[in-house]
């Protein structure tokens, strides 16, 4: 497991794997572990081998961990990755009721496993953000802070984040009183005030303590 935090070549892990004979590497990341509402979403991305060998197109300069980018930047990179360059990717989501049943860590691992399993053909190796994911049976390398160190993981983080944010915009249309369009389900003051006034809705994670506090009468 790697833990470097310095500014490094973001293809170093991908290139190292290609030098060992691996021909297909997927980056995997998730979005939505911390919110009080909505699904957790995982994405798996396989970048073109020519990018790994020679670098990404110049339009993608600056692509990094989605948390370091603005919503507009994330949308731009999402469009470039998925529509302009048509990279191979897959997403998976686990909804709030399942998160409540199996816990958020297992739900996250399940989403990651399903996203990887959707890739056709399957990658030969997976680069995962964070710690080892036991549900992924393909050989993997876990990289702490990988969304800022690996281009493939960074691309997955953007696809997962934009996919989840768009889902939360749709949920905002169903339950506009909670402000999901603004906070995406995170526990902001606005969100907590709405929970106090209206109680939880069907996409709230009732196993999370801040939501559980408003479900005693359910």
Image: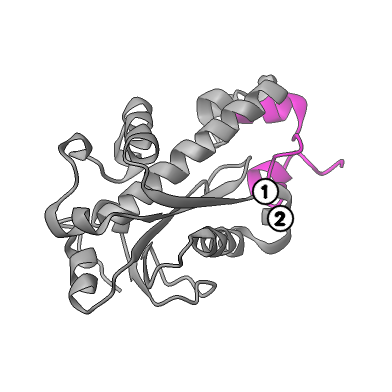
Q: Within the magenta stretch, is there residue 27?
A: no
Residue for badge 2: 98
Label 1 SS: loop
Residues under numbered marks 1 and 2 in contact, where contact means CB atoms less than 8 Å apart: yes
Stretch of the chain drawn in magenta: 191-218
Image spot of residue 40 (x, y percent):
57, 49
Q: Nearer the viewer, residue 60 or 204?
A: 60
For disc 1, the neighbor class at 10 Å (few under 14, some 14 to 19, many from 20) is some
Please determine whether, in this image, residue 74 is positioned above or below residue 119: above
Q: Nearer the viewer, residue 116 or 120?
A: 120
**Which residue lies at the image location 29% right of the left edge and 39% below the top edge?**
68
Q: Nearer the viewer, residue 208 or 15?
A: 15
**Which residue lies at the image location 51% right of the left edge and 34% below the top edge?**
165
Q: Within the magenta stretch, is there residue 212?
A: yes
Considering the image in quadrants, where does the C terminus appear? top right
Image spot of residue 212 (x, y percent):
72, 46
Image spot of residue 94 (x, y percent):
63, 52
Q: Quadrant of residue 118?
A: bottom right
Asked if residue 7 lies left or right of residue 157, the reply is left
Q: Nearer the viewer, residue 60 or 157?
A: 60
Label 2 SS: helix
Considering the image in quadrants, where does the N terminus appear? bottom left
For disc 2, the neighbor class at 10 Å (few under 14, some 14 to 19, many from 20) is some
Furthest-right residue in this view: 218
Residue for badge 1: 95
Question: From where the camera sits, is residue 193 visible?
Answer: no
Question: From where the camera sits, is residue 108 visible?
Answer: yes
**Which residue lies at the image location 60% right of the left edge and 23% below the top edge?**
179
């Amino acid at each position: 497991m790697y833990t470097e935090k310095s500014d490094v070549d973001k293809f170093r892990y991908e290139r190292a794997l290609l030098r060992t004979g691996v021909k297909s590497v997927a980056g995997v990341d998730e979005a939505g572990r911390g919110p009080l509402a909505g699904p957790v979403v995982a994405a798996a991305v396989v970048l073109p081998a020519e990018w790994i060998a020679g670098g990404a197109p110049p339009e993608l300069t600056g692509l990094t961990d989605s948390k370091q980018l603005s919503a507009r930047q994330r949308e731009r990179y999402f469009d470039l990755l998925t529509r302009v360059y048509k990279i191979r990717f897959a997403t998976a989501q686990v909804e709030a009721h399942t998160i409540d049943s199996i816990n958020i860590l297992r739900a996250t691992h399940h989403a990651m496993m399903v996203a990887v399993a959707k890739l056709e053909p399957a990658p030969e190796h997976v680069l995962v953000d964070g710690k080892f994911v036991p549900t992924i049976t393909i050989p993997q390398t876990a990289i702490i802070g990988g969304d800022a160190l690996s281009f493939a993981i960074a691309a997955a983080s953007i696809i997962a984040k934009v996919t989840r944010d768009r889902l939360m915009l749709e949920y905002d249309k169903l339950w506009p009183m909670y402000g999901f369009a603004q906070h995406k389900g995170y526990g902001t003051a606005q969100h907590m005030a709405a929970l106090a006034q209206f109680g939880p809705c069907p996409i709230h994670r009732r196993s999370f303590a801040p939501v559980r506090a408003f479900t005693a009468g359910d």
